[in-house]
Amino acid sequence: MHAVINDIISSTEKRVQNLKTKIDLSMIKDDTTNKRDIITAISKKKTQGEVAVIAEVKPASPGKKLQDIGPEDAAMIATEMEKAGAVAISVLTEPEFFHGSVDNLMSVRKKISLPVLRKDFIIDEIQFNEIESDLILLIAGILGDKLGSMVEMAISKGFEPLVEIHNESELKNALETKTRIIGINNRDLSNLEINLATTLQLIPLVKEFDRNNGQSHIIISESGMHTIDDVKMVVKAGADAVLVGTSIIKSGEIYAKTKELVDALKD
Ligand SMILES: O=P(O)(O)OC[C@@H](O)[C@@H](O)c1c[nH]c2ccccc12
């Protein structure tokens, strides 16, 4: 792990300790009734010849500020993304390194009707009780042996888990869990470098597993995509959806940039 990731995990451990003193167990929700389904939404995009773009409300990444985003701005940005045809919205809730907040997520989920992904560093089940979302990110490289049980707990709490992996051994671990969605992160958490070839290399392994086991995972390519060509490349390789933050936020034209990527397959 890169030093920054270790710092993020330490900071998350403190947040979790703090949550444990604050969250009353009676607050635990297992509300599976009003969840928004991303799997159907993704297949619908495909039949329309559009790219399933999960657009991310991302105020910063470690050491790089993008845009101050409070709850009102988050809702406005997400509304533009929804209008432009995004299939789902990802909202950063990690406060220290990504300047996100659970208030941003709450505000977004109230304003729009797309499925919402909670983007954070989930290391303890108590975090499932912090806020409601449709999907929740679980990072294989961080959870290690705990991945399978965290996936099951997330499901029992009504979340659709999105398990993020970056290499073959993390993928193997992910495929042993009950997750239906695999996110291939093009960013290597050990050096923070981006390489879109990660997606191209790992997709065939998922497909092979699915063929041999009669399963069909949804594959999302995550991070480092900026252009129509980037998106086309990973979709042609078999990605069912793409997760894009930085290039949409940095463009300053949320609607236009999101739409450009949604329409990447049209000419
Ligand atoms: O901003 P980008 O390069 O388009 O990437 C978005 C998303 O993939 C990235 O924010 C991300 C991927 N995995 C994460 C885990 C935690 C926080 C953030 C992330």
Image (cartoon, helix red, strand yellow):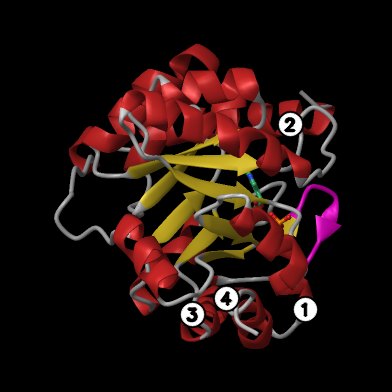
Tell me the mark number nearer the camera, choosing from 3 and 2. Answer: 3
- Residue position for label 4: 262
Residue 138 position, x and y percent, is 49, 35
Decide: is 121 above or below 190. Answer: below
Q: CA distance from mark 1 to mark 3?
A: 17 Å
Tell me the mark number nearer the camera, choosing from 2 and 4. Answer: 4
* Mark drawn on residue 85: 3
Disc nearer the start of the sequence (1/2): 2
Q: Which residues are magenta?
A: 61-67
Residue 39 position, x and y percent, is 34, 55
Q: Say if mark 4 contacts mark 3, CB within 8 Å.
A: yes
- Residue position for label 2: 5
Q: Under tag 1, what secondary structure?
A: helix
Disc nearer the start of the sequence (1/3): 3
- Residue position for label 1: 251
Q: Amino acid at mark 3?
A: Gly
The answer to whether residue 176 is left or right of residue 245 is: left
Q: CA distance from mark 4 to mark 3?
A: 6 Å
Disc nearer the start of the sequence (1/4): 1
Disc nearer the start of the sequence (2/4): 2
Q: Residue furthest top?
A: 145
* Mark drawn on residue 83: none
Whether residue 13 appears in magenta in the rendering, the answer is no
